[in-house]
């Protein structure tokens, strides 16, 4: 049996509709749809979530679970830079909190588990996107 996976993708991206294909793709047998941070068995389970990569990593880390995080469909910082304006409904304080939490997730405690290279890349892209949002808001406030 294969280790469990948290699959993070934006809301409405087809996770539930394609869950059978995802289970087959990752050779897993059990499914948790709409995962929000609850305990996940260490093997055989695919947990689908629309939590951002940093939130999903943080939730698993809080439970001291060493589970692979797979992310697909999230926009990268470059996309937001091309857009030219912030594209988030987060308040300024929520945006600052998200940046802080993502930085913390990128630098886990020495007592916790290490991130996979794929998770680290996804978190860094998410952090870049959050910073691009913050930068876009700062530029708009100068106008």
Image: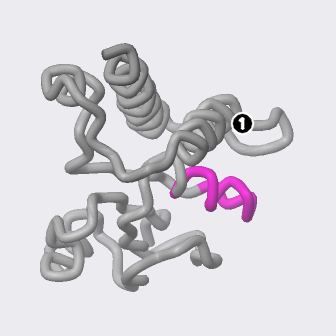
Instruction: Where is residue 92? Give x, y as percent.
Output: 53, 40
* Picture residue at 65% right of the left edge, 35% below the top: 100
**Vertical placement of residue 126 versus 19, above or below:** above
Q: In the displayed structure, does residue 52 sit left or right of residue 95?
A: left
* Picture residue at 17% right of the left edge, 65% below the top: 13
Q: In the displayed structure, does residue 65 sit left or right of residue 120?
A: right
**Vertical placement of residue 107 versus 60, above or below:** above
The answer to which of 67 and 16 lies nearer the viewer is 16
Instruction: Where is residue 44? Give x, y as percent.
Output: 45, 75
Quadrant placement of the N terminus: bottom left
The answer to which of 20 and 93 lies nearer the viewer is 93
Residue 60 covered by magenta stretch: yes
Q: In the displayed structure, does residue 137 sit left or right of residue 23?
A: right
The mark tally for this picture is 1
Quadrant placement of the C terminus: top left
Residue 85 covered by magenta stretch: no
Instruction: Where is residue 70? Give x, y as percent.
Output: 36, 51
The answer to which of 103 and 122 lies nearer the viewer is 103
Instruction: Where is residue 136? Give x, y as percent.
Output: 33, 23
Q: In the displayed structure, does residue 45 sit left or right of residue 64?
A: left
Report crowding for label 1: few under 14, some 14 to 19, many 20 or more residues within 10 A (C-alpha). Answer: some
> Which residue was labeled with disc 1?
108
* Picture residue at 14% right of the left edge, 21% below the top: 82
* Picture residue at 44% right of the left edge, 27% below the top: 134
Span highlighted in magenta in the image: 56-66
**Vertical placement of residue 134 versus 35, above or below:** above
Overall secondary structure of the magenta stretch?
helix
């Amino acid at each position: 049996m294969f280790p469990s996976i948290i699959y993070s993708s934006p809301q409405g991206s087809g996770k539930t509709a394609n869950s059978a294909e995802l289970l087959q793709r990752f050779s897993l047998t059990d499914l948790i749809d709409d995962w929000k941070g609850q305990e996940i068995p260490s093997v055989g389970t695919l947990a689908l979530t629309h939590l951002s990569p940093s939130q999903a990593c943080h939730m698993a880390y809080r439970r001291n679970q060493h589970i692979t995080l797979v992310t697909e469909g999230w926009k990268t910082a470059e996309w937001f830079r091309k857009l030219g304006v912030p594209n988030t409904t987060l308040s300024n304080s929520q945006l600052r909190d998200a940046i802080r939490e993502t930085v913390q997730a990128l630098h886990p405690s020495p007592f916790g588990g290490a991130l996979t290279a794929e998770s680290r890349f996804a978190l860094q892209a998410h952090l870049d996107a959050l910073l691009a949002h913050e930068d876009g808001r700062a530029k708009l406030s100068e106008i």
